[in-house]
Amino acid sequence: MKRRPPGDRATSRAEIDVGAAAVAPPGRAGSYFSSISVRLLHPEHRDRLRLRDLQRQLMRIYRRIDANIEAGKAGIRAEEWLIDNRHVVQDAVAQVQRHLPRDFLQRLPRVEPADAHATLRVIDLASSLVRAGPTPVDIDWIERTVSAYQSDGALTIGELWALPSVLRLLVLRELVAAACECLELRTRAATADTPDREAGAVAVAGAVVSLRRLDAHDWRLSFERLSKVEALLRSDPAGAYAAMDFASRNRYRGAVEELSRGSPLAEVDVAATVIAHCLDANADQPGARHVGYHLVSAGRPRLERALGFRLGLRRRLLRSL
């Protein structure tokens, strides 16, 4: 049986008892986040997180706004934000479609009970970040909070790459909910903005700014700061890994993912084994002190044996050619 990633436990969508800018108290991060109450998300998050439903809702919202404009009705603030930032919303939807394909999601860890109906851990975490964090989103706050969360165990490489896209999706949902409420209130009130509609407009604006911030941020930087696998590989005894370009480092991280999928070990344990092999290298084999020697070069077969790695059918066929 494959060992689950370290610290793979249920988080909560709903209740993280932190203020808008707070993180776990120093020295208490592990117990702080393990005390989060357990409540699984609705199964709606399966099947690509019901992105198609969200797209249909957005289309209805924009059709309704366009109809109001055609009818000569004075715009309300929420509508103005949505019209002026239509491209921001469309780009966010496209990004989620592109970066959260179903086969990728199916490989990500789930919260307990870890069956086909359980919530993906990254969705549970992202939901907590959106609910507990500042609005608009604060990337620095997200990094600090995720770093504290990982004191109980590492997120996988795939989870860290999925996180910004899942955050976009959840922000889009908040935007849709706020926009629908504003438009519904409009049908029941005069054209002037009411206090309730003002609150809705603030929520729409916050969601739009959040999407802009997520789009402007280079998540590769956050990923490499947060990844426990990356931290281990950067301890490369040869000192070469950290000096490599991003594409090369990403290739090595991909090798760690593959080795973990085909072995009983979590990614961080694979990376730790690689470092151990580097440190055990003979003095007459200086190249063997580099992590790449074991991940993608001559040391790979020995590493695979040490990990108990088994090739998938596709890889076996490729190697036989």
Image (spheres, helix red, strand yellow):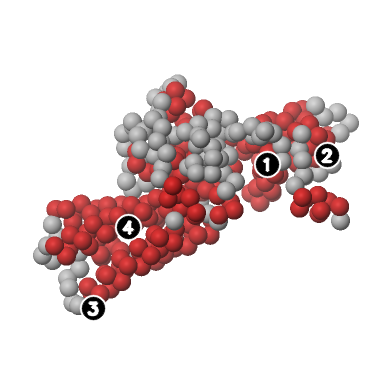
Q: Residue at x 67, y 46 (%)?
A: 254
Q: Residue at x 77, y 34 (%)?
A: 308
Q: Earlier in the sequence, mark 4 or mark 2?
A: 4
Assess whether mark 2 and mark 4 are in contact (beta carbons under 8 angstroms): no
In the picture of the structure, the residue carrying the numbered disc 4 is 176
Name the kind of residue labelled 2 in the image.
Pro
Q: Position of residue 27 (x, y in %)?
A: 45, 21
Q: Earlier in the sequence, mark 3 or mark 2?
A: 3
Q: CA distance from mark 1 to mark 3?
A: 55 Å
The foreground one among 154 and 318 is: 318
Q: CA distance from mark 1 to mark 2?
A: 16 Å
| Relative vertical location of residue 122 with respect to residue 55 in this rendering, above or below | above
In the picture of the structure, the residue carrying the numbered disc 1 is 261
In the picture of the structure, the residue carrying the numbered disc 3 is 70
Q: Position of residue 289 (x, y in %)?
A: 78, 33
The foreground one among 51 and 91 is: 51
Q: Residue at x 46, y 53 (%)?
A: 49
